[in-house]
Image (tube, rainbow, N blue to C red):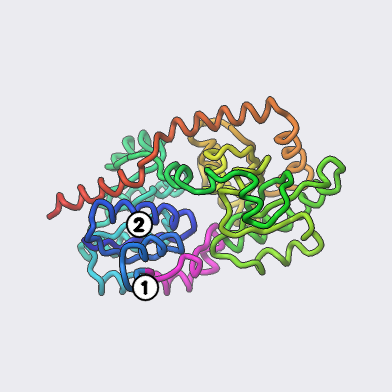
Amino acid sequence: MKYYIIAGEASGDLHGANLMRGLYAEDPGADIRFWGGDCMNGVFREHQAGEGLVRHYKDGAVMGFLEVVLKARTLSRNIASCKADIDSWHPDVVILIDYPGFNFKIAKFAHGKGYKVFYYIAPKVWASRERRVKKLKAWVDQLFIVFPFEKEYFERKGVSYIYRGNPLIDAIDSHPALSESRSDFFARVGLEDRPFVAILPGSRGMELSFMLPRLTAIMEKMHSMPEYASWQFLIAGAPARTMEDYSKYLVGHESYVKVLFGETYGILRHAKAAVINSGTASLEAALIGTPQVVGYGSNIRLSFEIAKRIVRVKYISLGNLILDRLAFREILQNDFNTENIVAELRRLLEDDAYRTRMLTDYSEIRTLLGTTGASAAVAKAMIEELRKYE
């Protein structure tokens, strides 16, 4: 069968790659064409010849309400290009991975053209823009969810769904970084083995521009303290970024701040604590076991204020949402400052009872998400659904 998959950001690329592995395993004759990134492209090249990647997510990913408006023209062109490509390729199914601003437009188009539409990793309608539930019902043939708390919500809304666990557990547990020793990690990345704090500022330009100036001030403050003067700060470089995106913020701090690309899981595994931009990375840290504090904000103040009024959930981090309580702190917008973050980092590093309580909550998060094998199970369920239409 022919599968057309659309992922619009780094987390979608990761889950899309694991889904593709499952599709190839269940359907050896699978023919896949996709919008995604390096992870998906790597899986494609293991199984197919030619070019499957239509467009890399780094060419169009945006977030935030005003940010979407500012890049409306680019998004419009990408949507038109995607529609034309789908119609010329004639897939058996269009599989949409999160990224609702783009993917709902494709869902409407594909449904109208008679293509089967699957949505994998539900848009967060339980958090905001609940009107999109009507779009799910109208344009999506099958929804595949990945969080246990979503089941009750979609049942209440009358939306058919399939739940097979969370694919992030597969991605983490199978990753080589989880079995690599600390000494081997430092030797491989060429750094001295010293205690360090992980810094994950996000992947989008708007995130970096908000987070990095503040994080630089935080790292400078920590480094000035005698007890942390010998520590390092390791920044996990985003896959679609280059060193130039980070270096302009780090001038004068290069002796104790390093940027590593392609090392997110290794950095998280060996860090004493982490400062993380809200997103998938905060759940990854919880599953790996890294004590953390989450931050979020926008340089466009109006964008943050709009989001605050629209979003209905109590927490912005998936781990806290899964538990329905705070496992780790979330510090937002103006509160995301040097004084608050340094104080929280010191608590994470120095208060053993605080750390232990957080790690206990992490264990509960993992239990609630289920066991490994979610990606393969979803791929199998998708193929079973498609065969119903044959």
The picture quadrant where one finds residue 188 is: bottom right
- Label 2 sits on what residue type? Leu
The answer to whether residue 105 is seen in the rendering is no
Residue 76, horizontal then vertical, whole percent: 43, 71
Q: Residue at x 21, y 48 (%)?
A: 385
Residue extent of the magenta highlight:
53-80
The picture quadrant where one finds residue 209 is: bottom right
Circle 2: is it few (<14), some (14-19), or many (20+) Cα within 10 Å? many
Residue 275, horizontal then vertical, whole percent: 66, 46
Q: Quadrant of the N terminus?
A: bottom left
The residue identified by callout 1 is 80
- Residue 291 as seen in the image, left or right of residue 112: right
Judged from the image, the secondary structure of the residue bearing numbered disc 1 is helix
Q: Quadrant of the C terminus?
A: bottom left
**Predominant secondary structure, magenta span:** helix
Marks counted in the figure total 2
Residue 15 covered by magenta stretch: no
Front one among 184 and 343: 184
- Residue 96's disc is 2
Q: Residue at x 46, y 42 (%)?
A: 173
- Residue 349 as seen in the image, left or right of residue 180: right
The answer to whether residue 306 is seen in the rendering is yes
Q: Residue at x 56, y 58 (%)?
A: 262
- Label 1 sits on what residue type? Ala
Residue 306, horizontal then vertical, whole percent: 57, 52
CA gap, disc 1 and disc 2: 16 Å
